Image (spheres, rainbow, N blue to C red):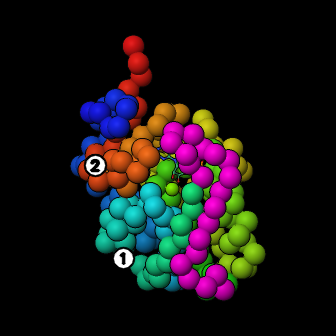
Amino acid sequence: MKLLDKEFEKYISELEIAERVSELAEEISENYANDEVLILSVLNGAFIFTADLIRNLQCDYQLVFVFANSYDGMESSGEVKTCYTFGRKLLQGKRVLILEDIIDTGNTLKYLLSEIHQQKPQGIEIASLLLKPDAYKLDKKIRFVGFNIPNDFVVGYGMDYNESGRNLKDIYILKHQK
Ligand code: 5GP
Ligand code: MG
């Protein structure tokens, strides 16, 4: 499958994603069974994961969004920019669950965690559909992980390559040139 100038191959099917998302929703619902959770979805990438996950949740939740951006093409630029779509004081005293599409180096997460900490939430946990364990550099454990993947570039299910491919139903991985 060609996207812009790069070849990708199918990596995780729509069905596998749906099954794993529903399992994650079950784990998350159990974890927050007795308390409301404030879900902080990280845009743009996490929008489809968020929509599917919350429709499988069985716990009380509140949903808010933050835009975060550090990627330029296929490389992490290192510099993170965030834009909150709500008053950050809302995070105070809450059990916050950050929802990410994919965690690579953890750079974006590190930045978000430091901003959220300033608001003194009751706790912060993280759920990410995908994690690149070999690239991840933080001590903070990712409590809910959909799939561990290698250090390769993926697209689809909300994740883009230069704003293309977010609409793909399956997740694709960059094909290595032979
Ligand atoms: P990190 O800051 O952890 O290095 O990267 C996190 C963000 O970079 C993710 O939320 C995602 O937006 C983007 N990203 C990281 N790896 C990939 C990838 O393989 N594919 C796509 N499309 N985005 C990625
Ligand atoms: Mg993201």
Residue 17's tag is none
Q: Position of residue 24 (x, y in %)?
A: 41, 60
In this picture, is 32 found above or below 79?
below
For the residue pair 76 and 118, the one nearer the viewer reads as 76
The answer for how far apart the CA atoms under marks 2 and 1 are is: 27 Å
Q: Is residue 85 magenta?
A: yes
- Between circles 2 and 1, the one closer to the viewer is 2
Task: Give me the residue at 60% from left, 35% from top.
Answer: 134
Q: Which residues are magenta?
A: 70-89
In the orientation shown, which residue stands out farthest toward the top?
178
Q: Position of residue 101 (x, y in %)?
A: 46, 55
Q: Is residue 93 something that shows in the picture? A: no
Q: Looking at the rendering, which quadrant does residue 135 occupy?
A: top right
Q: Is residue 175 magenta?
A: no
Position of the N terminus by quadrant: top left
In this picture, is 127 found above or below 66?
above
Q: Which residue is labeled 2 in the image?
A: 168
Task: Give me the residue at 60% from left, 44% from top.
Answer: 76
